[in-house]
Amino acid sequence: MCGDCKNFETIAVHGSCEWSENTGSISVPIYQTATFKHAGLSQSTGYDYSRLQNPTREELEKTIARLEGGKEGLAFSTGMAAIDAVARLFLPGDHVIISDDLYGGTYRLFEDVYKNYGIEVTYVDTTNLEEILKAIKHNTKAFYIETPSNPMMKISDIKKISELARNNGVITIVDNTFLTPYFQKPLDLGADIVIHSGTKFLGGHNDTLSGLLVASREDLIEKLRFAQVSIGATLSPFDSWLIQRGIKTLPVRLEKQQQNAIEIANWLKECSEVEEVFYPGFKENKGHEICLRQASGFGSMLSFTVKKKETVEKILGNVQVISFAESLGGVESLITYPYLQTHAAIPEEIRNKIGVTDKLLRLSVGIENINDLIEDLNKSFNK
Ligand SMILES: *Cc1c(COP(=O)(O)O)cnc(C)c1O
């Protein structure tokens, strides 16, 4: 029975193996309905109203839970909506320790929304356990990490951080958007909550937005589910289906994307206009050893700095196969300028400190032919 399968690729294709209907449909039906009828008083099919439960969304939630090795999954309209539900675990007076190099929107949410509600935040370099330890206070409730980080590709040690968390009675939250459970399973390493912007690799086609959470602890699931259905930023049936479909090809896409990324990273390293390339697959990358230990791949995200600022404009204005656009993880290669795009919400002083300077570019490598990608970069460098 397919529900007994343990292998990632099979689960990605077949999902939960728990839904059924009587036509023999291979693809999970899109239950495009707002509500469900009841046969009588106190009778329910288990589905009452689509904000609360929807069978298409439920299939996606079960699938991501299986892939991450968690108990339950929750699907939201965007990654930020998922992170917002996590932030609602905290109460005024609580303190959270967050990676200083992370998605700009997450920084904005904690800094410009939740600080106003009395939630304290300290940003530290979570690649350094000492720094985390030093930042712990009596009211610390969670460590929130992104690894590899966005955009500097720094690696935090999920296992050690989760141990430190457990010893101090706090929870560990990992944004696993960059590697996905195909390459990295934070719950297996001791984390309590996994976050995804499903907009990225899970959806994989740059055609819709979504957010996902996975957890195993009952008390956390209960609180997160309450936030999800109370606030209402749940994923629509059609978008749930799109993400479900995207996940089917996640393993083959990631393998190809990673292979392309390695070739591009090596090419960039030899490029005379490039100063430094940040890719966890490089042996000289500080977190390389940890990444090898905790993940089965390095992914297809990389960043690089150029020697002259003019080169940034030249590249962004001239790429043709690669698109100058925000976002990442899809089959189409995208190049981003974090300084003015994804990380614009972070104060300049902090951006400079962590390395998000005006000479940094971030590349999300897709599945195009590698020669076309390299030729595109080569041409735009030399225009
Ligand atoms: C994009 C992204 C988010 C936010 O997700 P949305 O779907 O855009 O709301 C959060 N974390 C990371 C690492 C991201 O790349």
Image (spheres, helix red, strand yellow):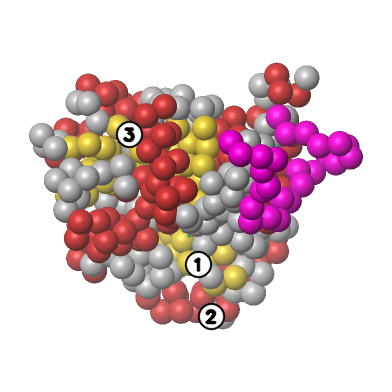
Q: Is mark 2 within 8 Å of ligand 1?
A: no
Identify the residue at horizontal 41%, vertical 79% (top origin): 310
User: Percent from the top left, x then y, of residue 207?
Assistant: 64, 63
Instruction: List the residue tagged with mark 3.
Output: 172
Marks 2 and 3, the one that precedes in the sequence: 3
Alpha carbons under labels 3 and 1: distance apart: 28 Å
Instruction: List the residue tagged with mark 2.
Output: 317
**Secondary structure type for disc 1:** loop
Q: Are circles 2 and 3 on residues that touch, CB within 8 Å? A: no
Alpha carbons under labels 2 and 3: distance apart: 41 Å
Relative side of 143 to 322, left or right: left
Main SS, magenta region, reads loop
Identify the residue at horizontal 52%, vertical 62% (top origin): 327
Above/below status of 238 relative to 381 = above
**Secondary structure type for disc 3:** strand
Marks 3 and 1, the one that precedes in the sequence: 3
User: Percent from the top left, x then y, of residue 306?
Assistant: 41, 66
Q: Would you say residue 22 sits in the magenta stretch?
A: yes
Numbered disc in front, either 2 or 3 = 3
For badge 1, the amino acid type reads Glu
Badge 3: few (under 14), some or many (20 or more) residues near its Cα, within 10 Å? many
For badge 2, the amino acid type reads Gly
Quadrant in the rendering for residue 206: bottom right
User: What span is in magenta?
Assistant: 18-42
**Secondary structure type for disc 2:** helix
User: Percent from the top left, x then y, of residue 67?
Assistant: 59, 32
Quadrant in the rendering for residue 68: top right
Judge whether residue 230 can be spotted in this image.
yes
